[in-house]
Image: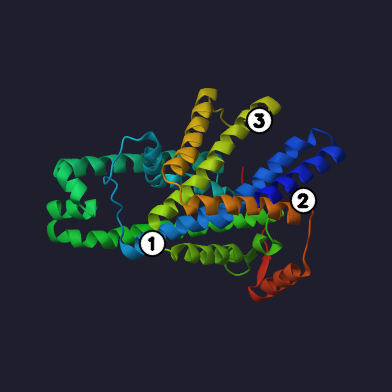
Amino acid sequence: MLVLTIFFLWDIYYESIYNSGIGSAHARTGDVLAFIFNWANTFILQPSSVAILCLTFSTYFLSEVMDSTTNNPLSVALAFYSGLWAYSGWSSLNTVVEELKNPKRNLWLAIVVGLSSVIILYLLTNISYFTVMNKAALLSSDAVAVTWGEEVLGVVAHALPILISLSALGSANGLTFTSARYCMVGARYGYLPEVFSCIQKQRLTPLPGIMLQTILAIAYCIPSDIDNLINFFSFVSWVFYGLTFVATICCRFTKPNGYRVFKVPMPLIIFIILISIYLIIAPVISDPNIGFLIATLILLAGLIFYYLFVFRQMQPKLMKQINMFLLEFLDLTKAAVNIEA
């Protein structure tokens, strides 16, 4: 697959440069990366996020974050995966910008207030854990929050697993709301079949995207391995976080006079890129497993699909027939773009 992917990329860039000159390579790179990002969100990031939350809901799971601690810098990256997963909701609101009122104000406000609130709550929660329990109790507990509840809340602690599951269910509901928008926007650019750019006429929701994400999330739930699923998700997400900041540096030079709502300091950009490289490479070295391989293969498969269906614009008759059937069966219509300044 790697050899095939390299061949397709060579053909894409050779033809682009041959027909339009060397300047087209930059635009083609952006298009390829945009497709792969949409591909990864559709088939990895969003459904795996929902699957993680569903597994949490179904098992009332609380990970043993204090168990098997280590000073190995390579192994610490895996701990960061679990920790950063807890804050990963900051990027979800970006997917529904066109449905926000006054997004320039409200998007920034929601992210800052929401993320700050979560950080404060998490810090206070951990301070409370260490205040009530000693190190031995923390390390021996299978569910730290439940152990804390038994010490502080008494019989009320039995409600904690239910509250945790409800919290996970609410998060899964929010992710389902946002994840289908990736499919819809990707389909508008021709990255996915046309049917995914449509919404249900009565409910005005991207029903095809929701159905696809639900099916994929169920598939990711089948192994019931929440730790590897978090690693699977985090590995791919940090690949694209890093690429996003690399693209930011490129835009500084290729579009120096472009309009920017805010300008990220260059030292911060470089720092995030270095962190991304660390969080991509270190886990693979310290704990290589099939999840990282599967994620890489899915990304490579995305490049192959890009070459065949976007660059070469192949349109199988079967796909057209499926599109027409789903449009009629699900009562769909093309979604109008409505972005309020």
In the rendered image, which quarter is residue 33 located in?
top right
Residue 63 image point, x, y percent: 31, 52
**At numbered mark 3, what does the secondary structure look like: helix, strand or loop?**
helix
Residue type for callout 2? Phe
Left or right of residue 49, residue 258 in this image: right
Residue 246 image point, x, y percent: 60, 33
In the rendered image, which quarter is residue 111 located in?
top left
Residue type for callout 3? Cys
Is any atom of residue 170 visible in this view?
no
Res. 311 mark: 2
Left or right of residue 327, residue 298 in this image: left
Q: Nearer the viewer, mark 3 or mark 1?
A: 1
**At numbered mark 1, what does the secondary structure look like: helix, strand or loop?**
helix
113 versus 336 height, above or below: above
Left or right of residue 38, residue 90 in this image: left
| Callout 3 touching callout 1 (CB < 8 Å) | no
As drawn, the residue found furthest toward the right would be 19
Q: Nearer the viewer, mark 3 or mark 2?
A: 2
Disc with the residue nearer the chain's start (1 vs 2): 1
Q: Quadrant of the C terminus?
A: top right
Q: Which residue is mark 3?
A: 251
Which residue is depicted at the point 71% across and 51% down? 4
Alpha carbon separation for disc pair 3 and 1:
40 Å
Is any atom of residue 144 visible in this view?
yes
Residue 76 image point, x, y percent: 37, 38
Q: Which residue is mark 1?
A: 55
Residue type for callout 1? Leu
Which residue is depicted at the point 39% across and 41% down? 80
